[in-house]
């Protein structure tokens, strides 16, 4: 079954959950690069994503930059809709309810927005990217909108100025260092002219490096387990086929051919030769 899932469907290569997680890891590592940042062209960016994806992909599962880009853009559109539902529900969510109840409401809202009865199949994808800076920034508008519309007990609208500042400050704190700042830090420059990096920047870099290595190790381990499973299945199938041929050979050897015609005997001998070579 695993082999069948890896085959092309409708002219396109099937993307498994393992493939998607490998693509997400490559996207995160290239999106959070503080030095190159937005200076990469789209062509160069997706080539680097594809290169990192293929570095950890098993044989037969390599992808081109175009395939990675098209699959990401198609799927991330669904992730964005789900993320929007989650943001809206979270900002109006009644405290005291469980995480499971919250997610059930989000899935229900997603089906209403999409006008479909089909469940959202990429929650695992959303959980990986939802805390990334590029996705956190998408929450700001929704947070401000809900805070502006929130009523005091007196019935008056809340002031949005402080809330807007609070949201912006929170987003700024969670955003990685900008491109210019990162390049200056790498060259040993900065506003204070000091070579030493701040503890915050060092911590962010160490955290990113640790996550990258963990993702690489996890993907490599999953790839090895996947390859081992396929090899075990292939070996079991080969052994089963061999035993079937041995059984057929033994059964043919016990057949009395004294009443056979010359043609039948020739066919019988030919089949024995074939099975003997295959065993």
Image: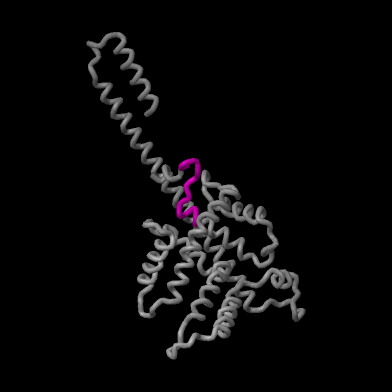
From the viewer's perspective, is 224 left or right of 177?
Answer: left
Q: Is residue 182 or residue 102 the one in the foreground?
A: 102
In the image, 25 versus 194, the foreground residue is 25
Q: Is residue 40 above or below residue 146?
A: above
Residue appearing at x 59%, y 78% in the figure: 168
- Asked whether the viewer can see residue 70, the reply is yes
From the viewer's perspective, tell me whether residue 90 is left or right of residue 70: left
Can residue 220 be seen in the rendering of this structure?
no
Magenta stretch contains residue 14 = yes
Residue 179 sits in quarter: bottom right
The magenta region covers 8-20
Colour approach in the figure = one colour
Q: Position of residue 199 (x, y in %)?
A: 63, 79
The answer to whether residue 190 is magenta is no
Q: Position of residue 249 (x, y in %)?
A: 30, 25
| Residue 187 x/y as whole percent | 75, 70
Residue at 36%, 41% (x, y): give it.
236
Q: Is residue 94 above or below residue 71?
A: below
Q: Quadrant of the N terminus?
A: top left
Residue 15 in the image, given as x and y percentages of width and height: 48, 50
Q: Is residue 67 left or right of residue 233?
A: right
For this orientation, the residue located farthest to the top is 262
Instruction: Point out the residue furthest to the front here.
Output: 155
User: Relative to 51, is 235 above or below?
Assistant: above
Marks counted in the figure total 0
Q: Which residue does the image show at 36% across and 74% down from the upper left?
A: 98
The residue positioned 65% from the left and 72% from the top of the image is: 177
Quadrant assignment for the C terminus: top left
């Amino acid at each position: 079954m695993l082999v069948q899932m890896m085959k092309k469907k409708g002219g396109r290569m099937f993307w498994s959950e393992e493939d998607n997680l490998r693509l997400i890891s490559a996207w995160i590592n290239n999106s959070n690069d503080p030095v190159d940042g937005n200076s990469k062209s789209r062509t160069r960016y997706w080539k680097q994503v594809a290169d990192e994806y293929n570095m950890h992909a098993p044989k037969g599962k390599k992808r081109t930059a175009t395939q990675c880009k098209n699959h990401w853009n198609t799927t991330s559109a669904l992730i964005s809709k789900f993320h929007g539902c989650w943001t809206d529900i979270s900002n109006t969510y009644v405290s005291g309810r469980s995480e499971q109840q919250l997610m059930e409401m989000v899935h229900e809202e997603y089906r209403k927005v999409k006008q479909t009865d089909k469940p959202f199949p990429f929650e695992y994808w959303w959980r990986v990217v939802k805390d990334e800076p590029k996705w956190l920034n998408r929450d700001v508008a929704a947070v401000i909108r809900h805070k502006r519309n929130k009523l005091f007990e007196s019935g008056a609208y809340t002031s949005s100025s402080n809330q807007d500042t609070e949201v912006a400050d929170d987003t700024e704190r969670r955003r990685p260092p900008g491109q210019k700042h990162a390049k200056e830090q790498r060259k040993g420059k900065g506003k204070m002219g000091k070579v030493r990096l701040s503890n915050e920047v060092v911590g962010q870099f160490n955290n990113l490096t640790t996550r990258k290595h963990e993702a690489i190790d996890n993907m490599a381990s999953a790839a090895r387990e996947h390859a081992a499973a396929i090899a075990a299945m292939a070996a079991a199938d080969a052994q089963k086929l061999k035993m079937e041929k041995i059984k057929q050979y033994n059964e043919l050897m016990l057949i009395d051919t004294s009443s056979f015609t010359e043609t039948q005997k020739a066919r019988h001998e030919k089949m024995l030769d074939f099975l003997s070579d295959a065993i």
